Image (spheres, grey):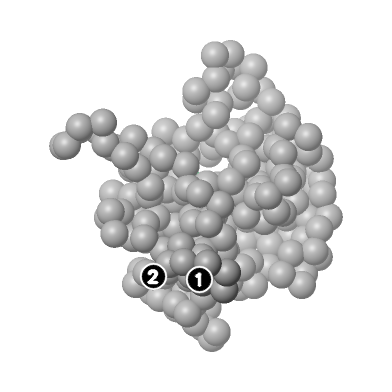
Amino acid sequence: MSGTVSPEDAYTAAPFVPDRGGLPALREAAAGCRGCPLHRDATQTVFGAGAATARVMLVGEQPGDQEDRQGKPFVGPAGKLLDRALEEAGIDPADAYVTNAVKHFKFTRAEPRKRRIHKSPTLRETTACGPWLAAELARVEPELIVVLGATAGKALLGSSFRVTEVRGTVLEEEIHGHRERLVPTVHPSAVLRAEDRDGAYRGLLADLKVAARALG
Ligand code: URA
C-alpha cells in the first residue's frame, strides 16, 4: 500500500531529544527514550560517558551485557581491550568521550533464563537512535571521531561504509552540517573473536596510533 507508514518506519528518537541543555540534560532525557522497541527488553539506556571537553569521541555499536547491567558504555571485555589499546596508542581513555550508535542492548536468548546473546541492531534501529549521536556530537564537538566497526560507520557515514576499505585513514566528512575528521577501525569485539587475536589487536593499535597522530 503506497503512502502507508509502517510502525517500523516511524522509529525515531527525535521527539525525545531536548534542544537545550548539556550532556546531563541529554543523558536524563535518553533514560526515557521510547523511540524504537529496543527499550522494552533492555535494562536501561546506556548513554555516552566522558567530558563535554573531550578531544576525541569513540563510537561503538551498542551496549553489551555488562554495559546494559551497569549503565555505562565499554565496561565489559571489549571495553577493557579498548582501554588497553588506547593507552598503548597514546590516547588517555580519560580524555575520550565514549558512546555507541545504539543506546540499548539488543539480544536474544537461546533458552529462557539462559545467557543473553548480542544481536546486531538493524539499520532502522541505528537510524532511529541517530538523533542521540547527533546531539552528543553537537555538545562535545570533538576534534576527532574514532569509528569502531561497521555499525558506527554506517550510522555516521551512511550504509555504503566498509570498515576494511577505510580503516586506519583520516577521513574528512560533513556530518550534520559540521566538517568532521574521523579515523575508522575495527570493533574491539571483533579483535576478541578473531582467530589471530594478536594480529587483530596489532591492527587495532596501528589504527589508533593514526588517530593519536591526527590529534597531535
Ligand atoms: N560493544 C560496543 O559497541 N559498545 C559497548 O559499549 C560495549 C561493547
The label on residue 116 is none
- Residue 136 seen in this snapshot: no
Residue under the image location 73 percent in, 32 percent down = 164
173 w.r.t. 3: above or below: above
Real-space Cα separation, disc 2 to disc 1, in angstroms = 21 Å
Residue under the image location 62 percent in, 41 percent down = 150
* Image location (x, y in percent) of residue 124: 53, 57
Residue at disc 2, secondary structure: loop
* Image location (x, y in percent) of residue 192: 50, 25
User: Which amino acid, by three-letter code, is at mark 1?
Assistant: Val
Q: Is residue 41 left or right of residue 96?
A: left
Local crowd at mark 2 within 10 Å, few (<14), some, or many (≥20)?
Answer: many
Q: Identify which residue, 153 or 69, lies in the foreground.
A: 153
Residue situated furthest front in the rendering = 1
* Image location (x, y in percent) of residue 212: 74, 43
Q: Is residue 210 left or right of residue 74?
A: right
Q: Identify which residue, 137 or 208, lies in the foreground.
A: 137
Q: Identify which residue, 214 or 178, lies in the foreground.
A: 178
User: Which amino acid, by three-letter code, is at mark 2?
Assistant: Cys
* Image location (x, y in percent) of residue 132: 53, 67
Judged by depth in the image, the label closer to the viewer, 2 or 1, is 1
Residue under the image location 78 percent in, 38 percent down = 166
Q: Is residue 78 left or right of residue 206?
A: left
- Residue 143 seen in this snapshot: yes
Q: Which residue is mark 2?
A: 33
Residue situated furthest top in the rendering = 196
Q: Which residue is mark 1?
A: 5
Residue 196 sits in which quadrant?
top right
Q: Of callouts 2 and 1, which one flags the residue occurring earlier in the amino acid sequence?
A: 1
Q: Is residue 201 left or right of residue 167?
A: left
